[in-house]
Image (cartoon, helix red, strand yellow):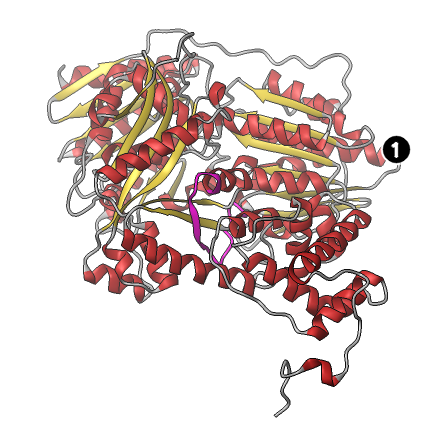
């Protein structure tokens, strides 16, 4: 196609997009990209003379600002915003006519997914670069020992050529594939009778928003109530949540009730749309209110007579003993099911808002975990979804391309009737990425089982020479998937760097052990880190995950590796799986992950003799650190997670109690000494129990949780009761029976024992000089 013909086709498509409210995309990949970049922009300006523009780039890279300045000259009229890729999270609620991505210095799928979504119907997306694979920052971070593949980039180019609404200018020439389909835009109809104020319904711009807004009335009923709202990005879920809160405040004010709303999210800007639309709703309802803004300009608090809405970070929410009013959790999947479970214990009214399928999508796995937790808490729930896009028409070709290119909505295939015979294999990544049916199956299993996913994951998996995909399949169907990464075999300079506190890409497990155990030898060992392991939903909890883990372990052993391990957020269910399969906890980060609210954990199964020696030493050092600092560094760790970490650790140490400590414990059992007066003796006895990996008996789970939470961590009784879901009376009973059992097992003593001794009874247990 000739250049002038290409731009004529583009202009026609832009006018058609404006009429049918869909988007077009121009992709430029050539060394002299500037001429076509400017020509594409000028073509769009013929259709829209005063567009709103967002331009994304890395401003600190050489010549990046020069390119930006050339482009900015074209927009002396109209709105032009330039943004560092690192700050694009703050723009997710915005919409633009023209979205331009500078890919010259970096090509990163997360940014593509995040920013393409900001273009409105009738708009244009432009991606431009000199080359998709050369000198790209994110790609360079995947390089191992000077090697990297380009499978992901080749698939990305292939998908650009397959879809409509896309115009390509590259070294080969010009290719245009205009959109020839139809789009659909629905008319918004407000019901005659509404539960929520009609003024709020008039702010809604989709029928989905009308329906969801009405459902917020559900929170006004008595008792525990949960609303779960999930949707792909750009469906207006945060906006309607804000309007729903304004409606609740209005109804409560009319009926003489106060309203207190806590909004939490991974960051204040993640919650900004909720706060902004709550303010809009209050204003349209003519409810007087004051707002307080953060230093960055986002609303952090809205208050008025008898109501208050305020943002509180996840850590602060975790530390609340009893929640008041309504808790709204935006991007709930990002904060994790443990955080949600804790919130469900503390608040009676909760709204969970989360993105599915999008660049940080959670998919069906999050919904499945959520339903299980809500069922356990016995809370009435409304599970709501929103389907219709707001920024562009239904049937938009660029959304279809984006979902396909970034594999945002993969689905595992239905299982065959007969799966009596199954096979284990390591996938050929080239074949996998170029076969959509196979890729969507395999990657779909990973996404369906893990509620935290993003497009970067697939590029790392595809292009990293050290990343492998292991599968179990039966016939044409895949049943289980494991992603591994080769780690270790480090040169001396990287070992020295890690010991001095430096960081480098990859080799997560060697890095953590070098820093926290300080044994240089581990850096020289070779191992596999299991990044993700997943089983099709229909076969979960049937032992298939353990089976593929066993196969991968044997695979590693046959290849002469020293260890196999994993690192993950300290989720109770996940940790339980690894401990059950013989993996030993050797490290927990001393800092809780701010975004997810959990402590990252490292587990290892040693395969060689030298690895066994190092893991034994590492486990002992870790156990000592955990028990000695659980009242401080790990105070916010859940007792259930701490229990698993201690159970999975076989390090042993004998702890001796003096007769006077034993007397204090007996006095506690007799009721003549309160817990507080006998706490030192009970603390030593508890340490003895958890250090004793040789015993052939165990306390009940609830007894161990109370010992960890109260005796070792020192949590207040009320907070621990909320955390464990056990009332104060039951906790006292569990503490008493645990202490009585340990005293009997270790010292054959009970409540009838001696509660006082003479100096002559002590022997040399104590010395005073």
The quadrant of the picture occupied by the C terminus is bottom right
Q: Does residue 111 show up?
A: yes
Marks counted in the figure total 1
Lateral position of residue 729 relative to residue 444, left or right? right
Name the residue at 39% across, 60% down: 617
Asked which quadrant contains residue 157, the reply is top left
Residue found at the very far left of the displayed protein: 172
Magenta stretch containing residue 525, yes or no?
Answer: no
Q: Does residue 109 show up?
A: no
Query: Under tag 1, what secondary structure?
Result: loop
Magenta stretch containing residue 584, yes or no?
Answer: yes
Q: Position of residue 200 (x, y in %)?
A: 70, 26
Name the residue at 36% across, 36% down: 111
Placement of 448 over or under 635, stated as above or below: above
Asked which quadrant contains residue 15, the reply is top left
Q: Where is residue 76 in the image (x, y as percent from the top left)?
A: 35, 39
Residues 213 and 686: in front is 686
Q: Where is residue 39 in the image (x, y as percent from the top left)?
A: 22, 28
Name the residue at 39% across, 13% down: 419
Placement of 203 over or under 329, stated as above or below: above
Q: Where is residue 117 in the image (x, y as percent from the top left)?
A: 42, 28
On the image, numbered disc 1 is attached to which residue?
255
Residues 31 and 153: in front is 153
The quadrant of the picture occupied by the N terminus is top left
Majority secondary structure of the magenta segment?
loop
| Residues shaded magenta | 579-598
Lateral position of residue 143 relative to residue 278, left or right? left
Residues 716 and 119: in front is 716
Residues 457 and 133: in front is 457
Placement of 471 over or under 517, stated as above or below: above
């Amino acid at each position: 196609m000739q250049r002038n013909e290409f731009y004529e086709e583009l202009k026609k498509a832009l006018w058609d997009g404006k009429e049918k409210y869909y988007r077009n995309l121009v992709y430029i990949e050539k060394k002299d990209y500037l001429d076509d970049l400017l020509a594409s922009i000028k073509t769009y300006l013929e259709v829209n003379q005063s567009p709103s523009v967002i331009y994304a780039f890395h401003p600190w890279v050489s010549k990046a600002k020069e390119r930006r300045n050339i482009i900015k000259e074209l927009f002396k009229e109209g709105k032009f915003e330039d943004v560092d890729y690192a700050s694009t999270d703050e723009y997710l609620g915005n919409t633009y006519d023209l979205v331009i991505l500078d890919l010259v210095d970096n090509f990163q799928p997360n940014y593509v997914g995040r920013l393409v979504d900001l273009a409105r119907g009738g708009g244009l997306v432009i991606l431009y670069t000199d080359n998709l694979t050369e000198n790209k920052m994110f790609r360079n971070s995947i390089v191992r020992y000077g090697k990297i593949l380009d499978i992901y980039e080749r698939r990305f180019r292939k998908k650009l050529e397959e879809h409509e609404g896309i115009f390509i200018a590259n070294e080969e020439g010009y290719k245009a594939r205009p959109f020839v389909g139809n789009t659909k835009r629905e008319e918004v109809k407000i019901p005659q009778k509404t539960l929520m104020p009609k003024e709020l319904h008039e702010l809604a711009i989709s029928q989905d928003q009308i329906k969801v807004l009405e459902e917020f009335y559900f929170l006004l009923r008595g008792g525990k109530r949960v609303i779960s709202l999930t949707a792909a990005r750009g469906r207006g879920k945060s906006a309607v949540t804000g309007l729903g809160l304004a409606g609740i405040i209005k109804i409560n004010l009319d009926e003489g009730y106060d309203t207190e709303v806590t909004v939490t999210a991974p960051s204040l800007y993640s919650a900004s749309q909720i706060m902004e639309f709550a303010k809009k709703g209050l204003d349209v309802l003519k409810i007087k209110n004051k707002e307080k803004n953060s230093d960055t300009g986002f609303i952090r608090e809205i208050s008025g007579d008898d109501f208050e809405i305020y943002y509180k970070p996840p850590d602060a929410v975790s530390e609340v003993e009893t929640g008041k009013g309504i808790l709204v959790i935006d991007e709930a999947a990002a904060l994790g099911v443990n955080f949600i479970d804790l919130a469900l214990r503390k608040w009676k009214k909760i709204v969970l808002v989360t993105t599915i399928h999008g660049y940080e999508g959670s998919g069906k796995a999050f919904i499945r975990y959520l339903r299980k937790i809500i069922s356990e808490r016995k809370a009435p729930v409304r599970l709501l979804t929103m389907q219709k896009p707001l920024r562009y028409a239904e049937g938009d070709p660029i959304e279809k391309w984006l979902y396909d290119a970034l594999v945002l909505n993969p689905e595992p295939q239905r299982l065959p009737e007969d799966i009596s015979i199954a096979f284990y294999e390591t996938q050929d990544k080239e074949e996998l990425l170029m076969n959509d049916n196979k890729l969507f199956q395999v990657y779909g299993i990973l996404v369906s089982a893990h509620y935290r996913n993003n497009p970067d994951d697939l590029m790392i998996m595809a292009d990293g020479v050290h990343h492998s995909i292991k599968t179990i399949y039966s016939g044409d169907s895949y049943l289980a998937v494991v992603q591994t990464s080769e780690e270790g075999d480090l040169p001396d300079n990287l070992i020295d760097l890690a010991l001095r506190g430096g960081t480098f890409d990859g080799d997560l497990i060697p890095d953590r052990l070098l820093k926290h155990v300080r044994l240089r030898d581990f850096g020289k060992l070779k191992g596999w880190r299991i990044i993700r392991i997943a089983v099709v939903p229909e076969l979960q909890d049937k032992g298939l995950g353990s089976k593929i883990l066993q196969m991968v372990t044997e695979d590693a052993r046959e290849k002469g590796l020293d260890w196999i391990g994993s690192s993950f957020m300290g989720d109770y269910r996940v940790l339980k799986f690894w401990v059950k399969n013989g993996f030993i906890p050797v490290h927990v980060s001393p800092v809780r992950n701010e975004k997810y609210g959990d402590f990252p954990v490292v587990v290892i199964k040693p395969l060689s003799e030298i690895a066994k020696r190092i893991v034994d030493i590492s486990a002992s050092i870790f156990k000592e650190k955990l028990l000695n600092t659980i009242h401080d560094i790990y105070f916010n760790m859940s007792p259930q997670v701490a229990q698993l970490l201690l159970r999975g650790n076989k390090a042993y140490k004998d702890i001796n109690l003096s007769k006077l400590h034993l007397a204090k414990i007996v006095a506690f059992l007799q009721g003549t000494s309160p817990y507080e007066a006998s706490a030192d003796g009970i603390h030593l006895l508890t340490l003895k129990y958890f250090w004793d990996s040789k015993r052939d008996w165990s306390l009940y789970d609830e007894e161990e949780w109370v010992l960890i939470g109260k005796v070792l961590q020192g949590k207040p009784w009320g907070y621990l009761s909320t955390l464990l879901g056990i009332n104060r009376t039951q906790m006292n009973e569990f503490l008493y029976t645990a202490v009585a059992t340990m005293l009997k097992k270790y010292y054959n003593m009970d409540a009838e024992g001696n509660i006082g001794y003479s100096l002559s009874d002590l022997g040399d247990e104590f010395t005073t000089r």
